[in-house]
């Protein structure tokens, strides 16, 4: 994907106005890249963290059904993003403990002030990506991130978003351009609509939870849980008020998580063959549900990461089938 995206690069869209590697304080939605296939439409905002800003189906009357919470048109702080669309997480997912990476005897604080108050979700969602290829149903985005004190490795990422009549494919890759090995992890973070009556079903080898909402790390485990079903009451996951579950992917190495919307006329099924974890997140009272495939365990990046050699690439894919 990397070489293809670079070879087909176009100059139809302006380059970012801020320096490469710098995180802007504010992101502003611009003219989106619009994709269509059959009755499905998608909108991509490269300047807002490479975000899939809308994913919807148009019915025979012309009405739109949104599967993802659509991103609005208002500017937003790069550290306070709207809970909408779907964005890439890199060069790690979720948050590092104490915002610090411990690597080969070094303590690296992975928090870029003043643009970021924490290490949450990395840099991909906070920066402007470049469009290097686009068509009626596909676009390829590129992010070049030079080494900096908060992350002393140079890497290049590509995000391909391809729409077809049945759904959307998102392919995320990261290539290490530094001389030495780079610790890396990838994730994708969609915000699905989660109205009352919607139903989530998936299988997991085990489910981990944090002891309270003040702790972001998984610490309580239920093993061999098998099939899981959750019915939305307009937000939240369980009666104990937990907003986040950490699900280990079944031994087969693939997960399928399906959302059925009230009435059963619409559904979204999320799949990944590359993820070892699925983070399931829905705060109480907030009608959205995040299903986040991840290559490493949240809060354990010091030990559970991929050491990517110079010139090598780490990949993550996510397929969303829509009915």
Image: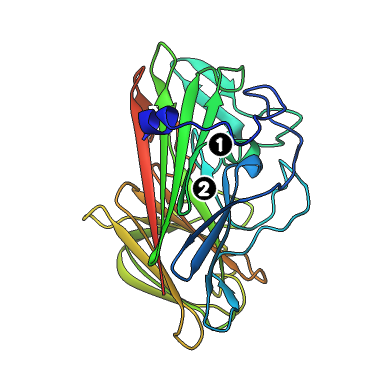
* In-image side of 73 versus 2 (left or right): right
Q: Quadrant of the N terminus?
A: top left
Q: Residues within 10 Å of mark 1 (few under 14, many from 20)?
A: some
CA gap, disc 2 and disc 1: 8 Å
Q: Is residue 181 above or below residue 288?
A: above
Which residue position is annotated with label 2? Answer: 217
Q: In the rendered picture of this protein, how many numbered marks are placed on residues?
A: 2
> Badges 2 and 1: C-beta atoms under 8 Å apart?
yes
Q: Position of residue 175 (x, y in %)?
A: 40, 26
Q: For residue 24, say whether it is visible.
A: yes
Q: Secondary structure at mark 1?
A: helix
For the point 43% across and 18% down, the residue is 177
Q: Position of residue 26 (x, y in %)?
A: 76, 39
- Judging depth in this view, the residue of 150 and 192 nearest the camera is 192
Q: Secondary structure at mark 2?
A: loop
Q: Is residue 79 above or below residue 99?
A: below
Q: Quadrant of the C terminus?
A: bottom left
Query: Residue reaching furthest top?
Result: 179
* In-image side of 38 versus 197 (left or right): left
């Amino acid at each position: 994907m990397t070489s293809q995206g670079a070879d087909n690069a176009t100059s139809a869209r302006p380059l970012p106005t801020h320096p490469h590697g710098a995180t802007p304080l504010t992101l502003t939605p611009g003219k989106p890249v619009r994709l269509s296939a059959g009755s499905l439409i998608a909108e991509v905002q490269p300047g807002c963290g490479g975000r899939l800003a809308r994913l919807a189906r148009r019915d025979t009357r012309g009405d739109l059904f949104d599967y993802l919470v659509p991103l609005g048109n208002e500017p937003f702080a790069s550290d306070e993003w709207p809970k909408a669309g779907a964005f890439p997480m890199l060069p790690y997912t979720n948050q590092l403990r104490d915002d610090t990476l411990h690597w080969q005897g070094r303590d690296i604080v992975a928090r870029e002030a003043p643009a970021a108050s924490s290490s949450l979700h990395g840099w991909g969602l906070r920066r402007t990506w470049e469009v290097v290829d686009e068509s009626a149903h596909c676009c390829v985005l590129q992010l070049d991130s030079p080494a900096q004190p908060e992350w002393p490795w140079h890497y290049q990422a590509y995000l391909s978003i391809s729409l077809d009549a049945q759904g959307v494919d998102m392919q995320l890759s990261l290539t290490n351009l530094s001389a030495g090995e780079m610790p890396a992890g990838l994730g994708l973070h969609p915000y699905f609509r989660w109205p009352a009556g919607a139903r989530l079903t998936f299988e997991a080898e085990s489910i981990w939870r944090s002891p309270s909402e003040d702790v972001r790390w998984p610490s309580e485990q239920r093993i061999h849980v098998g099939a899981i079903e959750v019915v939305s009451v307009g937000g939240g996951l369980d009666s104990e008020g937990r907003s986040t579950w950490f699900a280990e992917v079944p031994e087969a190495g693939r997960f399928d998580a399906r959302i059925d919307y009230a009435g059963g006329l619409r559904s979204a099924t999320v799949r990944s063959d590359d993820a070892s974890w699925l983070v399931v997140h829905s705060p109480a009272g907030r009608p959205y549900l995040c299903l986040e495939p991840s290559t490493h365990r949240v809060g354990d990046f010091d030990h559970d990461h991929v050491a990517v050699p110079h010139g090598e690439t780490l990949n993550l894919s996510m397929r969303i089938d829509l009915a």
